[in-house]
Image (cartoon, rainbow, N blue to C red):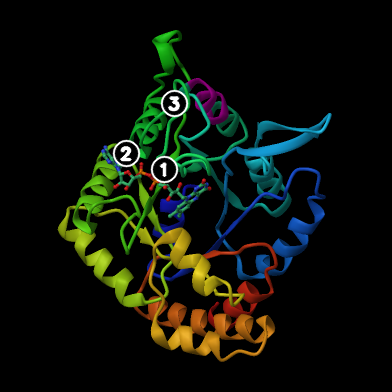
Amino acid sequence: MKVTEHIKNAKGKTLFSFEIIPPQKGSNIQELYNNIDPLMEFKPPFIDVTTSREQHVYIEKDGLLDRKITRMRPGTVGICASLKYKYNVDTVPHVLCGGFSKEETEYLLVDCHYLGIENVMALRGDAMSHQKYFEPSKGGHLYANELVKQIQNLNKGKYLHDVIEADDKADFCIGVAGYPEKHLEAPSLQTDLKRLKHKVDCGADYVVTQMFFDNKKYFEFVKAAKQAGIHVPIIPGIKPISIKKHLQLLPQVFKIDLPEELINAVENCKDNKAVRQVGVEWCVQQSKELQDAGVPVLHYYSMGKSDNIKAIAEALF
Ligand code: FAD
């Protein structure tokens, strides 16, 4: 079922969902299942599976370092299919512009369609670590709105190059990313909102936000988005802090602010076990306020071990 249909069927009740990251290639998938198993009792209607960009790896050969490009966490569509059929849950593969040509994206979407996957998140992806700015692959998309258009074309039975007359159309529900504290490259929040509106006008059905730790940022974003003419569901994406290093890492990577009260609480922790507890308590408090405000879904970024997400879900669902 589509994410938007799940939201409609919930009739105002807040749903629980989460995002997982494929394991590094060479790792056993059982560990992923072990982390998902405890979360299934909270009946997530859908689970997101991220896609990692390719990266450089260095291989020593005859005393010299040889640079290769590889994707360390492949398997997004395979994992989506395995979770869908193992748990009877809808899955949402993240589809990236970065690292893919339009042709490769079309093949991936055809695979998803045949596997009965009905939702996709359309994302640009970040620049690779050696690049200052995002660069599309040869024959790939520059912005997520172009990817949204390609997916919508498939929904109309329009394939690349018009080489076939389709008698079977895809029917993907499309999610896109939104940034309550603006995307790091955007010159202003207002400009970023205009671009989000453009993604929705191109055919996005719902928005999932970047993580935030102050609900005020989300509420103001939703209000500004409505004023900008965005009327699709805006799902809050939230993450419990789990290590002290997050205080530097999250603002550095995502250009987001952390509230003073949270920073102080984390700084006063004697070890990361205590930080994990602070992260859970903060996230429960954030989630309760969002739930009371009637958000459609609480979507959790679960990086690996799921005990903290389970503790949060137990307090809410
Ligand atoms: P876009 O919507 O294309 O926006 C990128 C930037 O370009 C923004 O600053 C925007 O304002 C600007 N822009 C957009 N359109 C135009 C235009 N027409 N002209 C000029 N400027 C424009 N990354 C991954 O690698 N894998 C994942 O699985 C993944 N999942 C994510 C899930 C969520 C919920 C979120 C919030 C992010 C996720 N990301 C993921 C990160 C995302 O790929 C990065 O934040 C990326 O830098 C931007 O992606 P986007 O889809 O928002 O891009």
Compared across the picture, whether 10 is left or right of 202 comes to right
The image quadrant of residue 276 is bottom right
Q: Which mark is residue 174?
A: 1
**Figure check: 48 above or below 98:** below
x, y (%) of residue 205?
A: 35, 46
x, y (%) of residue 231?
A: 24, 54
Q: Classify mark 1 as within 8 Å of ligand 1 or not, answering yes or no.
A: no
Mark 3, Cα crowd under 10 Å, few <14 / some 14-19 / many 20+, is many
Residue 62 seen in this snapshot: yes
Range shown magenta: 103-109
Rendered residue at 81%/33% (across/down)? 63
Q: Secondary structure at mark 1?
A: strand
Tag 2–tag 1 contact (CB < 8 Å): yes
Q: Which mark is residue 140?
A: 3
Three-letter residue code for mark 2:
Gly
Residue 299 seen in this snapshot: no
Compared across the picture, whether 28 is left or right of 68 comes to right
In this view, the residue in front, 36 or 250, is 250
Q: Answer whether residue 107 is magenta in the image.
A: yes
Rendered residue at 66%/34% (across/down)? 70
x, y (%) of residue 98?
A: 48, 35
Q: Main secondary structure of the magenta part?
A: helix
In this view, the residue in front, 19 or 158, is 19
